[in-house]
Amino acid sequence: MSYYAPGLCASARDVELFHGSPGRYTVGRGQDRITMVADDEDTVSMAMSSLTRMMRRRELGVAEIGRLEVGTESAVDRGKSTKSFLMALFEARDHHSVEGVDTFNACYGGTNAFFSTANWIEGSAWTGAYGVIVCSDPAVHPDPATLSGVGASSVSALVSPRAALVVRGQRATFIKHAWDFYRPVGWTSNDAIVDMTVATGQYEEAMLWCQDRLSRASASPDLFARFDRVAYHNNAPYHSKRNLRLMREKTYGTLAKAQHEAAFRRFAEPGTKIAAENATTYTCPLYASLLSFACASGPGLVDRHILCMAYGSGCAASLFGLHVTSVPQHASGVLAGLASRRPVGVEDALLLVDAFEMTHGRFGFVPSREDG
């Protein structure tokens, strides 16, 4: 797995002080930083960064890849896929036999890309080549009141029969027509229209429905007896903590706060390390959570079973299991690298967010940060 996040960030503590709410994001949500893009990066550039890093680390030639699918909700073109931009890497070696395009859907696109690529590996059309999935999104909220939710990242992962994370057992999927988060054609902003009350309720409905359905399908009323870790699609560590509480109370009934805290430390907290540094990143958080587990647990993760909760507004959700056969290969120092970034002040952060927002609907402009 390969992870890329821009070096531009701001301190969550500075943001909460700017909003006049000390402790709201650091203590309340467990955030350390937020991450932003300026006008010199976008979905394509971040996807290219995470993909090339993964290929170099694995010493992987383009001819070894037979499928590449991108999950995003931030495509830069309404007709041309983000994956087609990434083909520039393959065309340089005259390699064009690479199946897959994009799955375009709020937050869930990466998971659908993963399922599709896994199905390709298991199907009769598989050529013996590797599959690759790429998740990439900048989450831009130009309103200063929503600065705490800004994030940006890309995750690339190799899919093969010899995977470190193996899909095991059945899965449960919940799809519904909902208006919790959406981007109408012709909308005037990079940001989405969000009803946070509806969005929160919709996530919880989908999650608990999937929990019930997977429990019945696997004849296992207690999923926490089957799985050692839980990785969530989340916007901050507190989001995972709340989701875990809801799922465990559905299983065991009302539990004491101390029991919830102990369960969070055991099942979910190691998977929230990247989320603490990056806030909202749309299609990436679940896969960033899996990478967080690998970074935080190392060899201790081997032979564990991870329950994965994927969600995207609109809405689509899946609950599925992974068995860890070996530690996923990743760059050393992912967490240290994120923590070592030097935050900019809030006023500078707002200028950077505005710079990216001003790219919406513009053509032929020169990035203000073209010198890096």
Image: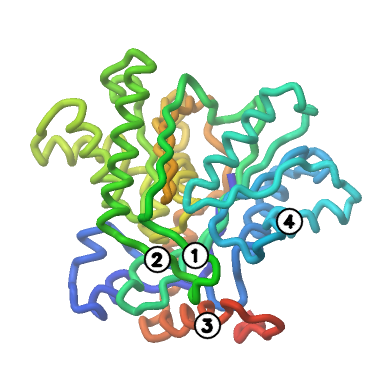
What amino acid is found at the position of numbered circle 3 in the picture? Answer: Ala
- Give the SS element for disc 3: helix
Q: Nearer the viewer, mark 2 or mark 4?
A: 2
Residue position for label 4: 86
The residue positioned 35% from the left and 73% from the top of the image is 147
* Spatial CA span between label 2 and label 4: 29 Å
Residue position for label 2: 193
Neighbourhood count class around disc 2 (C-alpha, 10 Å): few under 14, some 14–19, many 20 upward: some
- Give the SS element for disc 1: loop
* Spatial CA span between label 1 and label 3: 22 Å
Q: Nearer the viewer, mark 1 or mark 4?
A: 1
332, 184: nearer the viewer: 184
* Spatial CA span between label 3 and label 2: 20 Å
Q: Earlier in the sequence, mark 1 or mark 3?
A: 1
* Spatial CA span between label 3 and label 4: 24 Å
**Whole-percent x, y for residue 101 in the image:** 70, 48
**Whole-percent x, y for residue 211 in the image:** 32, 29
Q: Earlier in the sequence, mark 2 or mark 1?
A: 1
Residue position for label 3: 355
Neighbourhood count class around disc 3 (C-alpha, 10 Å): few under 14, some 14–19, many 20 upward: some
What amino acid is found at the position of numbered circle 1 in the picture? Answer: Pro
The circle on residue 184 is 1
| Above or below: residue 304 compared with residue 17 | above
